[in-house]
């Protein structure tokens, strides 16, 4: 609740001042904001399908093999699998 207030008022005042006013650390504010952003991300259909291929492989495909398998399935035109 407090983090939402800080976000709303951030256009009119400095975030550091707002955090002091509401007795919230800046790092805590940014951590909470990051958690909300991560929770609201949408999962694309390609990532769901790529995960299904990965699980079907017994969780042993690497990024190159997974990309190849997805391209072979012809549903990932232009989508690449991110390596860690």
Image: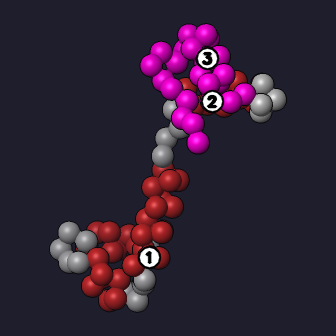
Residue 72 covered by magenta stretch: yes
14 vs 41, left or right, is: left
Residue 18 covered by magenta stretch: no
Query: Residue 1 in the image: x percent, y percent?
Result: 44, 74
- Numbered disc in front, either 2 or 1: 2
Q: Secondary structure at mark 3?
A: helix
**Mark 1 and mark 3: Cα distance apart in space:** 41 Å
- Numbered disc in front, either 1 or 3: 3
Residue at image mark 3? 68
- Residue 49 seen by the camera: no
Q: Secondary structure at mark 1?
A: helix
**Mark 2 and mark 1: Cα distance apart in space:** 34 Å
The dot on residue 27 is 1
> Along the polypeptide, which appears first: circle 1 or circle 3?
1
The residue at 38%/70% (across/down) is: 4
Q: Quadrant of residue 83?
A: top right
Neighbor class of circle 2 (other Cα within 10 Å; few <14, some 14-19, many 20+) is some
Neighbor class of circle 1 (other Cα within 10 Å; few <14, some 14-19, many 20+) is few
Residue at image mark 2? 63
Quadrant where the image shows the C terminus: top right
> Along the polypeptide, which appears first: circle 2 or circle 1?
1
Q: Secondary structure at mark 2?
A: helix
Specify the segment rendered in magenta.
61-84
**Mark 3 and mark 2: Cα distance apart in space:** 9 Å
Query: Residue 16 in the image: x percent, y percent?
Result: 30, 81
Q: Quadrant of residue 49?
A: top right
Whether residue 25 is situated above or below residue 59 in the rendered picture = below
- Residue 66 seen by the camera: yes
Looking at the image, the residue that sits furthest to the left is 12
34 vs 45, left or right, is: left
| Marks 3 and 2 in Cβ contact (< 8 Å) | no
Whether residue 69 is situated above or below residue 58 in the rendered picture = above
């Amino acid at each position: 609740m407090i983090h939402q207030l800080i976000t709303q008022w951030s256009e009119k005042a400095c975030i550091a001042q707002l955090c002091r006013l509401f007795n919230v650390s800046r790092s805590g504010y940014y951590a909470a904001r990051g958690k909300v952003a991560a929770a609201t991300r949408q999962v694309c259909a390609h990532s769901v399908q790529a995960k299904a291929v990965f699980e079907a492989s017994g969780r042993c495909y690497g990024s190159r093999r997974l990309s190849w398998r997805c391209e072979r399935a012809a549903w990932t035109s232009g989508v690449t699998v991110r390596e860690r």
